[in-house]
Image (spheres, rainbow, N blue to C red):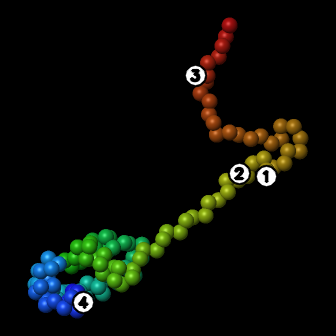
């Protein structure tokens, strides 16, 4: 608004009328909440104790502690403090090598190494042609 007034040389009243903004919103100053330091301290304490909890679960814990705080307010504080939930580490997948696998046991003679398939056959489903 200050730039607009300087560039066009307008009064505050005329500049507000030009952009369709009430003058009262131009002079508004937000007041810090009285419980903000206590809430912030408790939020950081919970976030350190439970690093895998996100802002929603922390908000629920804070409400259980008696704070009047919505999830959006907690999110605003969460972002202001630069908090993030660490990414979950992917577990290393093991190679599926069986002890009795063909690559582990080399066949030295006939019928020494057998492989088993997990496929199960139901005798009732297999149709046998008997003529």
Q: CA distance from mark 1 to mark 2?
A: 8 Å
Between the C-alphas of marks 1 and 3, the distance is 35 Å
Residue under the image location 33 percent in, 73 percent down: 55
Q: Residues within 10 Å of mark 3 (few under 14, many from 20)?
A: few
Location of residue 105 with respect to 45 vertically, above or below:
above
Task: Answer with mark 1 or mark 3, whichever residue precedes in sequence.
Answer: 1
| Residue 16 seen anywhere in this rendered image of the structure | yes
Number of the label disc, if any, that sits on residue 124? 3
Q: Nearer the viewer, mark 3 or mark 4?
A: 4
Q: Position of residue 110 (x, y in %)?
A: 87, 37
Residue at point 26%, 73% (across, down): 72
Q: Which residue is mark 2?
A: 98
For the residue labelled by badge 4, is the local secondary structure a helix, a strand or a loop? helix
Mark 4 vs mark 2, foreground winner is 4
Residue linked to disc 4: 7
Q: Secondary structure at mark 1?
A: loop
What's the distance in space between the residues labelled 4 and 2, CA to CA? 78 Å
Q: Which numbered disc, 4 or 1, marks the residue that appears first in the sequence?
A: 4
Looking at the image, do the residues carrying marks 1 and 3 touch, with CB atoms under 8 Å apart?
no
Q: Point out residue 81 in the picture as x, y percentages from the top left corner.
A: 36, 84
Q: Earlier in the sequence, mark 3 or mark 4?
A: 4
Q: Which mark is residue 104?
A: 1
Neighbours of disc 4 within 10 Å: few (<14), some (14-19), many (20+): few
């Amino acid at each position: 608004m200050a730039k607009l007034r300087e560039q066009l040389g307008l009064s505050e009243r005329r500049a507000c009328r030009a952009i369709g903004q009430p003058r009262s919103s131009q002079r508004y100053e937000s007041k810090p909440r009285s419980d903000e330091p206590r809430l912030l301290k408790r939020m950081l304490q919970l976030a350190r104790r439970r690093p895998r909890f996100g802002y929603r679960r922390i908000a629920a814990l804070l409400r259980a502690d008696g704070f009047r705080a919505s999830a959006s307010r907690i999110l605003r504080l969460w972002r202001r403090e630069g908090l993030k939930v660490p990414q979950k580490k992917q577990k290393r997948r093991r190679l599926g090598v069986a002890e009795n696998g063909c690559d582990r046991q080399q066949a030295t003679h006939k019928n020494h190494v057998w492989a088993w398939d997990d496929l199960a056959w139901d005798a009732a489903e297999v149709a046998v042609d008997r003529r």
